Amino acid sequence: MFNFFVKDNQKQGDCYFISGADFNHIKNVLRMKVGDTFLVSDNGVSNLCEIDDFDGDSVIARIIEENYNDTNLPIKIFLFQGLPKGDKMELIIQKTVELGVECIIPVEMANCVVKLDDKKKKSKVSRWQGISESAAKQSKCNRIPEIFDVVTYKQALEKAKDLDLLLVPYESKNGMTETKDALSLIKKGMNVGILIGPEGGFDEKEIELALENGGKVISLGKRILRTETAAITSVGMCMLHAEMELSE
């Protein structure tokens, strides 16, 4: 079933008025007709809707079942991603959105290969947000995860102070034992941060700062993972723990 996102001003009574690119997609690409159904995600809640009419450049969709499909995790995952090179960030966003991440914060780190000026940062974030929206639609998320503006490492740690837990995948002398122990700390309703280094890995001083700010080092196994693999694996582990241990 297809899923579309709306803003507050698109709802009137028990109907949504959908226009713009989504109108074109519904009418001309999907060729939907009156009576066809799809999901409408509104402020984190997905409602089952039925096409009531086509009015000019709008689709009028009437709610027939509220809170039809709750795909939200019982925790919120905040991914702090060291800027990778090439189009790896697009893959990271796509896959972690599918896994249920709450938001993604791109981070400039000491060993980042990529250096972006202010103009490129804005352009990249705008494109990344579009990828987040597409992935959210495809995976039937109840909301579109926000892609934050690029921040410095210190700014990232400052943001992480407001979270309940910050996980830092890195070389762990205790191996998967620390990973298991850290996952066991995650409880329903918690805000969990994951800090991923870039291709060049973390600088030792960055790890020290993360630990000073309450970060918990975990292992992702015996193999060395690429930054995009580390991000997807880390979010996936938290997602599985939340779905298996915390969901009702």
Image (cartoon, rainbow, N blue to C red):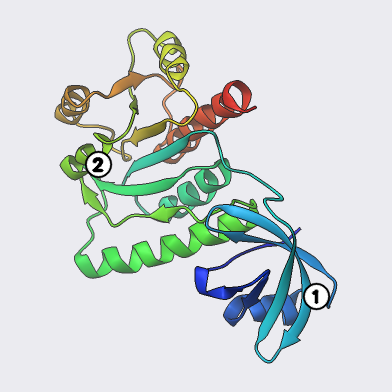
Q: CA distance from mark 2 to mark 1?
A: 43 Å
Numbered tag placed on residue 159 in the rendering: 2
Measuring 83% from the left and 69% from the top, which residue is drawn there?
Answer: 36
- Left or right, 120 with reference to 245: left
* Of the pair 211 and 203, the residue shown nearer to us: 211
Q: Which mark is residue 32?
A: 1
Front in this rendered view, residue 100 or 34: 34
Q: Which residue is the extreme one toward the bottom?
A: 56
In percent of width and height, residue 216 lies at: 31, 20
User: Mark 2 Cα within 10 Å, few/some/many (few <14, many 20+)?
Assistant: some
- Residue 231 point in image, percent of width and height: 44, 37
Three-letter code, disc 2: Lys
Please tell me in which quadrant of the rendered image residue 190 appears.
Answer: top left
- Classify mark 1: helix, strand or loop: loop
Mark 2, secondary structure of its residue: helix
Image mark for residue 41: none
Q: Is residue 162 above or below residue 58?
A: above
